[in-house]
Image: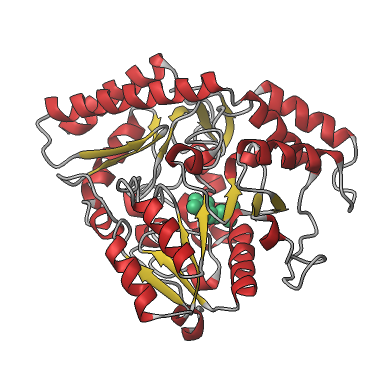
Amino acid sequence: MSVTAPGRQAELRARAEDLFPGGVNSPVRAFRSVGRAPLVLDAGAGPRVRDADGAWYLDYISSWGPAILGHGHPAVIEAVRAAALDGFALGATSPREVELGERIRAAMPSMERLRFTSSGTEAVMSAIRLARGATGRELIVKFAGGYHGHGDSLLVEAGSGLATLAMPGSAGVTAAAARDTVVLPYNDPVAVARAFEAHPDRIAAIIVEPVAANVGVVPPAPGFLDTLRELTAINGALLIFDEVITGFRLAKGGAQERYGVRPDLTTLGKIIGGGMPVGAYGGRADLMHRVAPEGPVYQAGTLSGHPLTMAAGVATLDLLTPEVYAQLETTGAALEAGLREAAAEAGRRDVSINRVGSLLTVFFRAEAPRDGAQALSADRDAYARFFGSMLDQGILLAPSQFEAWFIGAAHGEPEVSETVAAARTAFAA
Ligand SMILES: *Cc1c(COP(=O)(O)O)cnc(C)c1O
């Protein structure tokens, strides 16, 4: 780490704190739960990011998921540059929307038709509205610790940013919105069956992160997603996979390909925008047919399908070859093995790891969590110490116990070794 301009970061941070709540434009960027001042980052290249004082870090935040190719991939930059020269958003359908839409459908055949939005939150809100409009029912089932963006009805026991701040939910969400949301424990099929018994003909949809990744990573128990598929079908409810994180990360076809379960609706974001603001929702043609202007479910967006976003998305998806997914798996496995060894060497019995492909969380908890409540019982103070030691050694993890480490194609063997060496020190400290 070379420090070239000491003081610039502190100065920018002070100005940001004067402008933005907590000094940030999204709460997860604050470092409150790890007891540090939030970083101001001004550049990224490959697997690394640079702070405003000129220090570089090996990055596992990866823009919170999108940066699967690393930062500033030349092909993505070139695609965005070319799109920009065509004049930004023109307020009509553009060729690049068609190109990205077709690529998404080819990778994820359950998305027979789709629509782009400007964020994952919007995609989820729209899918929920569609599910209610299509079924004529009001209740939505979600799982504790599942994060589905900051729409009112889903900000209940929503993991991630809220959990980091130890907030049960958000002020400003009406009791009515909260009442329409049924929260169940993740990986508990009996609770799902009981919910259908308790609310006959009232549940519009179950929304689930097929691999929970917003309380740290918690994989689905074998058969859990299949059970959700069966129970929703039997009870006339829809199954929504929120693949904003897992889409194009766990496989080209997302978690639905990896686990072989076909949802009725899917929400996407993050990777499909190649680092630009994006979301998408889609699914069964008969359902999407109900979206305006074809049908009565209204949803819109001035900058939806923005050409620069679409260009970045197309370039990114085109680089996500089977070889890349094989490499992500190898890198993920190597990192997991190295971290386990480092923890064992340090005699840490209070550490467990959950990993699915290129998503990994080191939990400060003896047993790997199987649901949101278990994940939330991990030791935040121990994580804060680990985080601080890793940061001091130039490794940037998410500033929260309840987030995934995002491994990308730019993370190779040298980066894994560097990380494991730092973890040895951090676990011992
Ligand atoms: C990030 C995320 C969202 C929200 O996406 P934004 O683009 O931040 O609005 C929704 N669902 C999941 C699973 C996410 O991880």
Q: Residue at x 30, y 48 (%)?
A: 221
Tell me which residue sits at (43%, 23%) in the image.
1
Residue 104 pos. (x, y %): 66, 40
Q: Quadrant of the C terminus?
A: top left
Q: In this rendering, does residue 40 appear at all?
A: no
Where residue 409 sits: x, y (%)? 51, 23
The colour scheme used here is: secondary structure
Q: How many marks?
A: 0
Q: Residue at x 58, y 44 (%)?
A: 270
Q: Name the residue furthest top.
A: 414
Residue 371, position as x, y percentages in the image: 28, 55
**Picture quadrant where residue 258 is located:** top left
Image height of 278 relative to 290, above or below = above
Residue extending farthest front:
234
x, y (%) of residue 232? 46, 64
Quadrant of the rendered structure where residue 73 is? top right
- The structure residue drawn at horizontal position 53% and vertical position 60%, both measured from the top left corner, is 149
In this image, 217 relative to 149: left or right?
A: left
